[in-house]
Image: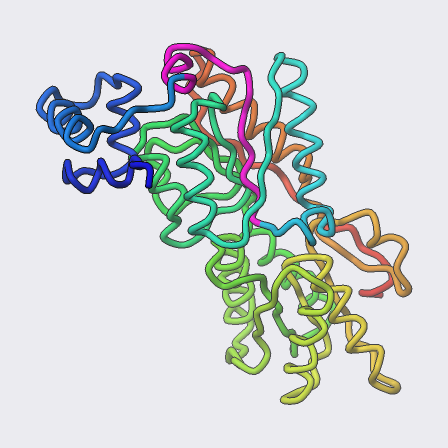
Amino acid sequence: MSVTIKDVAKIANVSPSTVSRVLADNPRISDETKQRVYIAMKEMDYHPNAIARSLVSKTTKTIGLILPNTDEDLFVNPFFIQIMRGISHYAQKKGYFIMYTYSNNEDQEVEYIASLINSRRVDGIILPVVRKNDKCVAYLKEADYPFVVIGKPENTEGVLWVDNDNFHAMYSVVNYLIQKGERKIAFIGGPPTLNVTINRLEGYMKAMENIGEKIDENMIQAAEFTENSGYDAMKRILSKAIPTAVVTTDDLIAFGASKAVSELSDQHISIIGFNNTPLAAFRNPTLSSVDINSEELGYFAVKLLINKLENEKEYINNYIVKTKLVERESTK
């Protein structure tokens, strides 16, 4: 059985990312720590990949994109296609290639990141989502490896990131419905561990509290970013109460919610999605949705990363991309 970096890290009593940094001769690693790692490598007869070692001091002109999707649904959600288009636009202009991989869960994402770092196959990494207590962000920060996040991390110190103002975007949408006379407004968010879900839920709750509405937990549900999951979440809400409007954090969720509502006889419920995917204009009924300018998110994310890789003297570490509600039949 071959010896791995994790085995060396255990013997040296350091993290796998520290071993990677020692192999890359990172100047931020102390001589004492390097010596411990070298002793552990010799003790375990560990030999780093020769090709990977030869690439340590070279650039690949390639950027890794870690997609939080399985291969079955990778291209189902237009959001990821749109950010990839923006990423490719700027990367190609600067002479960079994109290597993407998909995962089943957060732990697998960390494994892929470790593999990319250890093999030196990419110069930097893009994370298109950020979670609460994000393991990928923590790993990349510890490894001192160039990366950028689409989404605002909990601790922004030393992190490149690009995002919308998700609190304000949802707050504005709920206020828009309130001004139209709605009061019983439900919320269907994405996975509750995602920062984007947390921020948009906070915007929803603040808008409701401002008009003195008591938050009804039965009117708040979570869903995966699929139409079927949105349908199930809407059915759970309808089993407890009948809202007059629903805000969701993704168009696919909104499509599922609309399907559940359509099964009610003589009942109109306004529905608003997020991402303004191309299908939103062609559904029946059409879907009002918040345009988050996904392509711009991807474009500015890779711009920040490439600026760092090429040591551009630009002191920007984040971009906030504007949003806009596109009103259609579903809220009229």
- In which quarter of the view is residue 128 placed? top right
Q: Is residue 5 left or right of residue 259?
A: left
In the rendered image, residue 174, in percent from the top left (x then y), is placed at 63, 63
Q: Which sits in the foreground, 22 or 200? A: 22
Look at 33% across and 37% down and name the residue there: 2
In the rendered image, residue 6, in percent from the top left (x then y), is placed at 28, 40
Look at 48% across and 37% down and name the residue there: 149
* 163 in relation to 99, above or below: below
- Check the image and tell me how it is coloured: rainbow
- In which quarter of the view is residue 47 placed? top left
Task: Please identify the quadrant where the N terminus is shown.
Answer: top left
In the rendered image, residue 250, in percent from the top left (x then y), is placed at 67, 57
Read off the magenta span. 51-68
Q: Is residue 210 left or right of residue 187?
A: left
* 72 in relation to 315, above or below: below
Asked whether 286 falls inside the magenta stretch, the response is no
In the rendered image, residue 7, in percent from the top left (x then y), is placed at 25, 40
